[in-house]
Image (tube, grey):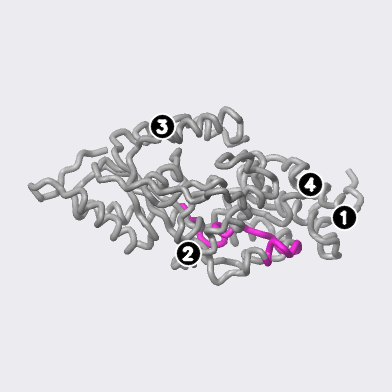
């Protein structure tokens, strides 16, 4: 990081006034809220290390590989004094009602965050614009922008910045808008005043824990990723454990059940960002139509989308499981037969399982 120079102004910066300006600029750039945190994450580091020790990260080896760099911002970016944390609402309206899709086993459910454009680039670009505004006002300073793009404890930092509290489902909650928002951070060497920690308002509620289809929330504030449908359909690259396939239902990319069950999300605000609105009818697409996509079509329809990161093979794997959980119809049977000789062993394995759910004979070897 470079040291602060205050541009051409010979007088010291008023960091309190600058912090207020940063929050105003952030709102002008489309962020719903902006807060500022220090870098002391000792309590969250203990939680992280215990989580890793329990192997709850599954095959996400990068979580362990980065170690405490995630909980020590200055280790990731030397010179970091403060973290400017920002959130941006993504609840998509208009879109087909989430519960309607989940209750129709012929449709594929895509987590609401992934229906539109990939948030990583959208949020990060806005953060860079925010940094430019700060630089124009304060002169050159050290910073780096992140949005789920580096080893950062973004929810812990957002909680410290006063943007909300970490709920029992391990997502950040805000009493006025629930949890349907993205987070991003600017690591900076500016000694800005920090915001007040938000009060936890979960109380005795266990709605998210009760709603999890696979029992992944093994205790309040403790999630075993190996059981989480988001992990199974997005992070896992191999075979989905048989014990979880029926429980996945028609969720083909991610899972929102814990958020949909949360009472605080009755206050959710529709996003003002058109980038996050549904594209290619992925808010309620027929499973058989998605399963028929060629790889070229998959790449075309997921261009600029977070979905593309799982790749075509895992996309087919996920849909095969959902088709195994769908009603037995001629369309479903035909779709499965069309993929029973797929080049990927992973796809074939899941197609065989799906066919067995419909009492169909496995393909001949």
Magenta part of the protein: which range? 100-120
Q: Is mark 2 on a helix, strand or loop?
A: helix
* Residue under the point 9% across and 47% down: 11
- In the rendered image, residue 131, in percent from the top left (x then y), is placed at 29, 52
Disc 1 designates what residue? 358
Q: What element carries label 3?
A: helix
- Say left or right for 258 vs 27: right
Nearer to us: label 3 or label 4: 3
Q: Earlier in the sequence, mark 1 or mark 3?
A: 3
Disc on res. 42: 3
Residue 125 vs 218, above or below: the answer is below
Classed neighbour count for the residue bearing mark 2: other residues with Cα under 10 Å, few (<14), some (14–19), many (≥20): some
Disc 4 designates what residue? 348
Classed neighbour count for the residue bearing mark 3: other residues with Cα under 10 Å, few (<14), some (14–19), many (≥20): few
Disc 2 designates what residue? 275
Q: Is mark 1 on a helix, strand or loop?
A: loop
Residue 68 vs 221, above or below: the answer is above
Q: Which of marks 2 and 3 is nearer the N terminus?
A: 3
- Say left or right for 162 vs 7: right
């Amino acid at each position: 990081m470079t040291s602060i120079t205050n541009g051409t102004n010979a007088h010291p910066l008023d960091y309190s006034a600058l912090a207020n300006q940063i929050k105003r600029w952030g709102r002008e750039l489309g962020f719903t809220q902006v807060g500022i945190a220090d870098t002391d994450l000792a309590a969250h580091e203990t939680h992280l290390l215990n989580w890793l020790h329990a192997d709850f990260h599954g095959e996400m080896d990068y979580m362990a590989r980065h170690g405490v760099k995630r909980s020590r911002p200055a280790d990731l970016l030397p010179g970091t004094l403060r973290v400017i944390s920002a959130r941006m609402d993504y609840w998509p309206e208009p879109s087909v009602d989430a519960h309607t899709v989940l209750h129709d086993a012929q449709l594929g459910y895509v987590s609401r965050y992934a229906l539109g454009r990939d948030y990583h680039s959208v949020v990060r670009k806005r953060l860079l614009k925010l940094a430019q505004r700060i630089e124009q006002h304060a002169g050159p300073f050290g910073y780096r922008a992140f949005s789920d793009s580096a080893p950062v404890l973004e929810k812990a930092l957002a909680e410290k910045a006063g943007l909300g509290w970490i709920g029992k489902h391990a997502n950040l909650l805000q009493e006025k808008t629930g949890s349907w928002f993205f987070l991003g951070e600017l690591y900076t060497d500016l000694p800005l005043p920090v915001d007040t920690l938000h009060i936890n308002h979960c109380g005795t509620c266990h709605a998210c824990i009760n709603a999890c289809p696979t029992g992944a929330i093994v205790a309040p504030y403790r999630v075993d990723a190996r059981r989480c449908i988001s992990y199974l359909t997005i992070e896992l690259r191999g075979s989905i454990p048989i014990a979880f396939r029926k429980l996945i239902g028609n969720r083909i990319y991610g899972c929102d059940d814990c958020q949909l069950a949360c009472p605080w999300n009755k206050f959710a605000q529709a996003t003002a960002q058109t980038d996050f609105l549904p594209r290619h009818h992925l808010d309620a697409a027929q499973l058989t139509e998605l399963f028929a996509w060629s790889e070229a079509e998959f790449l075309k329809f997921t261009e600029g989308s977070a979905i593309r990161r799982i790749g075509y093979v895992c996309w087919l794997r996920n849909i095969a499981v959902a088709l195994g959980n769908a009603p037995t119809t001629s369309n479903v049977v035909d779709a499965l037969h069309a993929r029973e000789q797929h080049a990927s062993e992973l796809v074939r394995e899941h197609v065989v399982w799906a066919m067995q759910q419909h009492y169909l004979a496995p393909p001949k070897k």
